Structures are given as C-alpha cells and as structure tokens.
Image: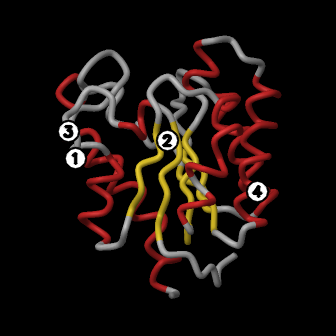
Amino acid sequence: NIDAKGKTIVCFGDSITFGYGVQPGEDYPAALAKIINFPVVNAGIDGDTSIEAVRRIKSDVLDKEPLLVIIEFGGNDFLRKIPLEESVKNIETMVQEIQSSGAMVAIADISSSIIMGDYGRELKRLSRKYQTIFIPHILGGILTDPKLKSDFIHPNADGYKMVARKVQRMILPYLKRR
C-alpha cells in the first residue's frame, strides 16, 4: 500500500509503545512525531497481548485513518506463554486488516539474539509474506545498557528516543514517497 492516503501514523502495541516507565510525551511515538513532523497516534496499552490487540484494531487503529501502522507485539505473549503460532496468527490478522483498509504496515521486532529469537524469525517471515516494512531489534543496544532502561525491560526517555530513531530510519523512505 505504498500509495496509502491516510492522515496519521498509528503506533499499535503494548507497554513498549505505550511508554511504560516514562512520563507522558517521553514515549517512542511522541519522540517519533517530533523527528518526522507528522501526526502520530500512540495506540499502545501496557500489558496488551496480540489477542487483545486483534479485538481493538478497529477502534484504536482503523478508525484513526492511518497512513502507516507500526505493529509492536510479542513481549507479553511470550511472558504469558501464548503459543508462538497463535501470536503470529494474530499479528497476521492485524496485517491483513490494516492492509485491507489501504494503509501501509511496519512490523517492529522486539526480539534480541538472546531472547525471543523465534519471534523475530517469524515476524520477519510474516513481513516478507505481506511485503511490510520490517524494523528489526528495536530494543537492540537498549536491553544491555542500564543507562537506557527504566527497569529490567522497558526503555527510559533516552531509550525511547533511540527506538524512535530506529523506527524513523526504516519508515522515512516510505513517507518521502508521498
């Protein structure tokens, strides 16, 4: 959907998108909005899994007239032991619904070489299948640096700025085509 006509970028995810551990406005969607100068909606919910996300896709994503939707799920699925196949199927459903609406999709991968490697491989496969933008290892360099985290997993304000820059690098070529 390179010719998408939407009006917003929707960041659709869990606590990483929501901005757990920082003040409002220090989350990665807010940081992204500042560096790309484009309306960005934060549709992140702390603790959300891909199961809940499928239920809220219409109200929290499709009704926001997205040009591009950045999907970031998997961490809570992993922690709650939701089978990988079910998580991937749910994300595939999201991709299909978003693309059917005419918007572009980016899949953000939170896996690292140590944790959730199977998720990363499956999300990359899904991205190739549906020709989405793939944003690998968005927490790379953050998970191993205590100065960039607010707790064991979540970035702090500087960490979320790093996430925003990684996302921006991957989506900017598609936004420039507009």
User: In percent of the image, x 60 and y 24: which residue is there?
Assistant: 116
Mark 1 and mark 4: Cα distance apart in space: 29 Å
Question: Circle 2 — which element?
Answer: loop
- Label placed on residue 157: 3
Q: State which mark lies toward you, 3 or 4.
A: 4
Mark 2 and mark 4: Cα distance apart in space: 24 Å
Mark 2 and mark 3: Cα distance apart in space: 18 Å
The residue tagged 1 is 25
- Label placed on residue 97: 4
* Label 2 close to label 3 by CB (< 8 Å): no
Q: Is residue 137 left or right of residue 129?
A: left
Q: Amino acid at mark 3?
A: Ala
* Label 3 close to label 1 by CB (< 8 Å): no
Q: Is residue 7 above or below residue 140?
A: below
Question: Circle 3 — which element?
Answer: helix
Front in this rendered view, residue 98 or 176: 98
Q: Residues within 10 Å of mark 4 (few under 14, many from 20)?
A: some
